[in-house]
Image: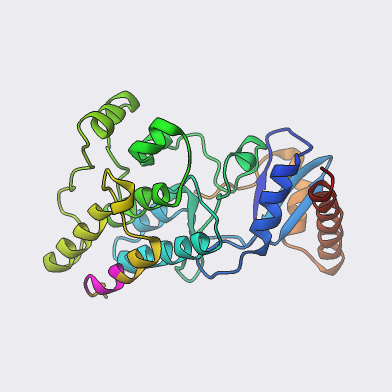
Amino acid sequence: MLVGLNTGIPLFDKRTARELYCWSRLEHKNVLKLLGLAEFRGFMAMVSPWMLNGTVLDYVRGHPEVDRLQLCVDVVDGLSYLHGQNTVHADMKSTNVLVSDDGIAKITDFGSAELKSSGLAFTATTTRPSTMRWLSPERIMTSTPTKEDDVYACGLEITTGEVPFTGMEDATICFKKIVHMEIPPRPLGFPSFEIEEADALWDIVTTTWSHEPSNRPEAGTLARQSTQGGKSPNTVTHITDDNLREFALYFHPGPQQWNAVLASMERVWEKVHKRLIVA
């Protein structure tokens, strides 16, 4: 199981409770399932299936032969489902997509700033690039996440193995996006499948970067385009803190330990529901 621990805030407000509750209700093969919450020494942890392959960017870098087009389809299928549930991810990038043991991409860490400000996340890292690289021009200007903004952020890293606007500072990226309306350049050698398929996929990717949000395809349309665009070719955060050794036992549980985890989840879910009810 994968554990996302908060950074020291033992309580959460009503909006955070609502986000967690909505996440727990989502069911899709390309969305990481939130199994529940566990309480440890006054702090809260989100519990979800362990994703052995880590983030999707780690996965494609470690497995250059992997079917990247299928991973793209996985991501946009999951995003289409979220949008169909009126859920905006608000932080689409490769560090927020994990890969299961059987190679299926699963979106995680969605749901807006409430969860982030509570210190709850599954993919925390100290070395991730600035989020500015993935933001649409209108998101930079207004700070309001939308479905169109999610689409703008979707897909590039999986196909290229690179972050958008590699090597550029935030100020330069803003200037290029807003003033010059530039999109990330096509990397050399993009990608590793036949040239005709690569051209078709690049055309699809570039439609998501339209400066006009209404001109971007919806996530569902993007999924269909990805499957029709050409034939596909044939660091997860671990528990290391000594203070968490006791908690780590719950994630190789015997029956008694598993019952303790479920009881802890039940107590926290009761708190979540109370905060949803209390104005």
Q: Is residue 255 left or right of residue 96?
A: right
- The front one of 145 and 233 is 145
Q: Between residue 80 and residue 264, name the one nearer to us.
A: 80
Horizontal relation, residue 207 to residue 235: left or right: left
- Residue sitting at x 46%, y 60%: 79
The colour scheme used to paint the residues is rainbow
Q: How many numbered discs sit on the rendered protein?
A: 0
User: Over which residues does the magenta segment extend?
Assistant: 225-230
Residue 29 screen position, x and y as percent: 53, 70
At a point 75% along the width and 43% down the height, the residue shown is: 14
Q: Is residue 167 above or below residue 158?
A: above
In magenta segment, residue 229: yes
Q: Residue furthest front?
A: 214
Q: Quadrant of residue 120?
A: top right
Residue appearing at x 74%, y 34% in the figure: 9
Q: Is residue 224 visible?
A: yes
Q: Position of residue 137 (x, y in %)?
A: 33, 37
> From the viewer's perspective, is residue 82 above or below residue 118?
below
The reply to whether residue 191 is visible in this rendering is no
Magenta stretch contains residue 190: no
Could you tell me which quadrant the C terminus lies in?
top right
Rendered image quadrant of residue 138 = top left
Query: Where, by quadrant of the figure, is residue 116 drawn?
Result: top right
On-image quarter of the N terminus: bottom right
Q: Residue 217: horizontal and vertical position, in percent?
A: 32, 59
Farthest left residue in view: 195
Q: Name the spot of residue 146 as percent of width and height, x first.
A: 46, 47
Indicate left or right for 122 with 105 as reference. right
Q: Which sits in the foreground, 124 or 271?
A: 271
Residue found farthest to the top? 171
In this picture, residue 196 sits left or right of residue 204: left
Secondary structure of the magenta portion, mostly? helix
